[in-house]
Image: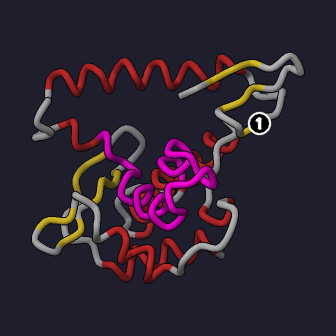
Amino acid sequence: LHLSIRRQRQMCIRDRVVPSNVNAARVIEPFLVAAKRATEIVINDEKEHGDRALLNLGHTFCHALEAATGYSERMLHGEGVAIGCILAFDLSAKMKLTSQEDPVRIKKHFSEMGMMNSIKEISGVLPDADSLVELMFQDKKVVNGKLNLILTKGIGKAFIARDIDPNLIKSIINESLA
């Protein structure tokens, strides 16, 4: 993550300006902690047979959004992951795997960090939910035509969910587009 501090006391994540009222330490510290933990997981699971797969929380949604935006500056990878994490929490809540409060907490956290937290924040025209789900089915996490996602049973409790109903995914995407 390319972070820089401008003289105007505004923090930038690439070209995205985060308001000066956002504490830089509050933004940077979670990334440092997460990067350290992710490094430990990758070292211990090089072939992605265990916990390493859980690092993909939000990524299948993100990859579909990146493809939909033409891998452009309209949405940076980290922003797509943030939106994807929120969508994964929304889907988990809709499936009654996690509380209804968890997605709200995650959205609030990303918002306080100046991150995108909804598909509708992506500039320009985007495809509809059907097309986005089709893009999700092009992801490497599709096995034998079945979409596998990283979902959650609560904050810090991610797991691999297999063969998710595409209609549930479409409903979550439609809610984020609204």
Circle 1 is placed at which residue position? 17
Image quarter for residue 175? bottom right
Q: Amino acid at mark 1?
A: Val
Specify the quadrant that holds the C terminus: bottom right
In magenta stretch: residue 112: no
Query: Residue placed at 20% from the left, 65% from the top?
Result: 142
Q: Mark 1 Cα within 10 Å, few/some/many (few <14, many 20+)?
A: few
Note whether 99 is above or below 145 in the view shown: above
Question: Residue 70's x, y, as percent?
Answer: 51, 62
Query: Residue placed at 42% from the left, 60% from the top?
Result: 61
Q: Closer to the camera, 125 or 157?
A: 125
Q: Going by the image, does 133 lie left or right of 141?
A: right
Note whether 158 is above or below 26 in the view shown: below
Q: Secondary structure at mark 1?
A: strand
Q: Going by the image, does 137 lie left or right of 154?
A: left
Query: Residue placed at 63% from the left, 23% from the top?
Result: 3
Start-end of magenta stretch: 55-83
Color encoding of the figure:
secondary structure
Q: Going by the image, does 46 lie left or right of 8?
A: left
Q: Going by the image, does 100 lie left or right of 36?
A: right
Q: Closer to the camera, 67 or 41?
A: 67
In magenta stretch: residue 61: yes
